[in-house]
Image (cartoon, rainbow, N blue to C red):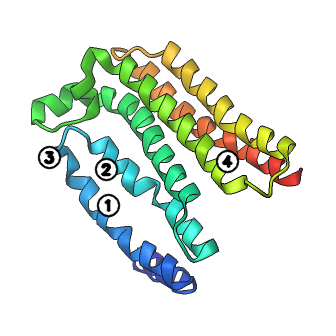
Amino acid sequence: MGLQCLLALGILLSFNQAAIAMGVLSLLPVTIYPFAKRFTWWPQAFLGLAFNWGALLAWAAHTGTIGWPAILLYLSGIAWTLFYDTIYAHQDAEDDELIGVKSTARLFGTDTARWLKYFLVGTVTLMGMAIINAALPQATILALVVALAGPWAMGWHMAWQLRGLDTEDNAKLLQLFRANRDTGLIPLIFLGVALLL
């Protein structure tokens, strides 16, 4: 593990100053997240803050600044993390209650599906706004339409998950959580095609 940390530091130090600063700042949400269940009902939000930091870091490494497309994509990622990790957290809700730790699954309870709809809309809307902000004014109309089809298709995949949601069925919850691997690949395919146009 020490070798991995040293390798990661070497890679980080090869970037520009803005990216190095973002890399160092990433330690803050990464450090806080493991303790979040003890002090907030929203540990999934802290997971989102930590997991999606790469959107900010990659933009900073590429441009030397933090721009709106990166911020919007970061927020989209946080909304998506709240979506899939709330699904996952329902598997542990009973155990979490017994040991006295918090989660969005426990907070939302039987109202989870409504909250997941909000996170779905937030994910798709924010990602679409990030694409528009990143693509304009250089992108062609065709490339922009194809790129925007990515979050739209991602939203349909998330809606499919919502239709199958049963917070009492742990096997189904695990299946839906794992389906988010595909959820993340969907916009990537559309963005890759849009780059070729």
Which residue position holds label 4? 132
Q: How many labels does the image show?
A: 4
User: Callout 2 environment at 10 Å: few (<14), some (14 to 19), or many (20+)?
Assistant: many
- Secondary element type, mark 2: helix
> At 39% from the left edge and 48% from the top edge, which residue is drawn?
48
User: Vertically, is 8 above or below 58?
Assistant: below
Residue 99 in percent (x, y) is at 11, 36
Determine the image quadrant of residue 165: top left
> At 39% from the left edge and 37% from the top edge, which residue is drawn?
82
Give whichever of 10, 18 is nearer the camera: 18
In the image, what residue type sits under mark 4?
Ile
Which residue position holds label 2? 46
Residue 86 in percent (x, y) is at 36, 32
Marks 3 and 4, the one that precedes in the sequence: 3
Seen in the image, is 83 located left or right of residue 101? right
Marks 1 and 4, the one that precedes in the sequence: 1
User: Callout 3 environment at 10 Å: few (<14), some (14 to 19), or many (20+)?
Assistant: some
- The label shown at residue 172 is none
Determine the image quadrant of residue 195: bottom right
User: Vertically, is 89 above or below 117?
Assistant: below
Marks 3 and 2, the one that precedes in the sequence: 3
Give whichever of 75, 104 is nearer the camera: 75
- Secondary element type, mark 3: helix
| Mark-to-mark CA distance, 3 and 1 | 15 Å
Residue 53 in percent (x, y) is at 45, 60
- The label shown at residue 38 is 3
Q: Do the residues labelled 2 and 1 touch (CB within 8 Å)?
A: yes
Marks 2 and 4, the one that precedes in the sequence: 2
- The label shown at residue 29 is 1
In the image, what residue type sits under mark 1?
Pro
Observer-side mark, 3 or 1, equals 1
